[in-house]
Amino acid sequence: MQMSFDSVTDQINLPTPELRPMSLGAEALLTVHDVAGFLRVPPSWVYERTRRRGRDRMPHIKVGKYLRFRREDVLGWLDEYRI
């Protein structure tokens, strides 16, 4: 059973505006905490995956000192690890 990112994010309560995805037209940029909540892992796990090299590196965008993620990139990265 494959769940879409939207169906999972609808189930996640994002209590503060800082944790809600930023809207850029049709795309939404996610924070480290958004991705960690979606994957149900600590934010430190997400940070560690962004520092890896090669195929294991989680795709991300640097906005100054901040990391942001496109949901399509995260889902594509996850698909590479599907067993």
Image (cartoon, rainbow, N blue to C red):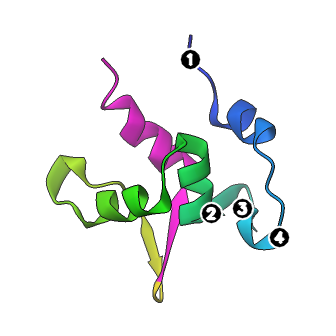
Between disc 3 and disc 1, whose residue precedes?
A: 1
The quadrant of the picture occupied by the C terminus is top left
Q: CA distance from mark 2 to mark 4?
A: 13 Å
Q: Which residue is labeled 3 in the image?
A: 21
Q: Nearer the viewer, residue 72 or 44?
A: 44
Dot 3 amino acid type: Pro
Q: Which residue range is magenta in the image?
A: 66-83
Position of 35 with respect to 44 (left or right) is: right
Task: Say if mark 4 contacts mark 3, CB within 8 Å.
Answer: no
Task: Check the image and report above or below for 2 versus 37.
Answer: above
Crowding near pointer 4: few (<14 within 10 Å), some, many (20+)? few
* Residue with the mark numbered 2: 29
Distance Cα–Cα, label 1 vs label 4? 28 Å
Amino acid type indicated by mark 2: Leu
User: Which residue is nearer to you in this view: 17 or 80?
Assistant: 17
Q: What's the CA distance linking mark 2 and mark 3? A: 5 Å
Query: Element type at marker 2?
Result: strand
Residue occupying image coordinates x 62% and y 23%: 3
Q: Based on the picture, tell me whether residue 80 belongs to the magenta stretch.
A: yes
Q: Residue at x 20, y 47 (%)?
A: 55
Contact, CB < 8 Å: mark 2 with mark 4? no
- Disc nearest the viewer among 4 and 3: 4
Residue 12 in the image: state x and y as whole percent. Answer: 75, 43
The image position of residue 15, as x and y in percent, is 84, 60
Instruction: Mark 3 and mark 1 in contact? Answer it, CB < 8 Å.
Output: no
Determine whether 66 is above or below 15 in the image. below
Judging by the rendered image, the residue that carries numbered circle 4 is 17
Q: Are marks 2 and 3 in contact (CB under 8 Å)?
A: yes
